[in-house]
Amino acid sequence: MKIASVAAVKARLDDYLRADASPVVVTRNGKRVGVLLALEDEEEIERLALSYSPKFRAIIDGAQRSIDAGKGIPAEEFWRRMKEKNRSQEKVAKRKRARTQRR
């Protein structure tokens, strides 16, 4: 991991973003004040944003507690339920489209 001052990052921002995509710890007066990350795609931006979201973290933590307490379901069951829910939503959407077209 590289370490660079705010002044150095400001002067050579493009170089830091292109280098090797490793994080750069940004310092001011020798104290760490931030981290510069080169992101590769939109999904990475979303993952980064979610990782710092207190709401998302609370959802994940709650789910983990449920699993630890034995309240989870096997992956196969989860995906079966998701397919079933998706089919149900598709049927509702199809009916709405049919009603709209009759008018």
Image (cartoon, grey):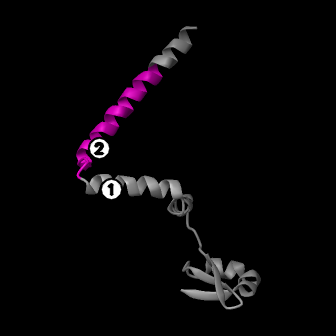
Query: What's the CA distance linking mark 2 and mark 1?
Result: 17 Å
Which residue is pictured at 58% across the width and 87% down the height? Answer: 2
Residue 35 forms part of the magenta stretch: no
**Could you tell me which secondary element the residue under label 2 belongs to?**
helix
* Front in this rendered view, residue 66 or 7: 66
Residue 84 forms part of the magenta stretch: yes
Vertical side of 3 occupied by 37: above or below? above
- Displayed quadrant of residue 94: top left
- Displayed quadrant of residue 31: bottom right
Q: Main secondary structure of the magenta part?
A: helix
Which residue is identified by label 1? 65
- Residue 78 image label: 2
* Front in this rendered view, residue 82 or 16: 82
Q: Where's residue 4, x and y in %?
A: 66, 88
Q: Which residues are magenta?
A: 70-94
Which residue is pictured at 30% across the width and 37% down the height? Answer: 81
Outermost residue, top side? 103
Q: Where's residue 49, x and y in %?
A: 56, 60
**Mark 1 Cα shell of 10 Å, populated few (<14), some (14-19), many (≥20):** few
Q: Where's residue 10, x and y in %?
A: 75, 81
* Front in this rendered view, residue 63 or 27: 63
Vertical side of 94 occupied by 55: above or below? below
Q: Which amino acid type is marked by label 2?
A: Phe
Outermost residue, bottom side? 30
Vertical side of 36 occupied by 81: above or below? above
- Screen quadrant of the C terminus: top right
Q: Which amino acid type is marked by label 1?
A: Arg
- Displayed quadrant of residue 6: bottom right
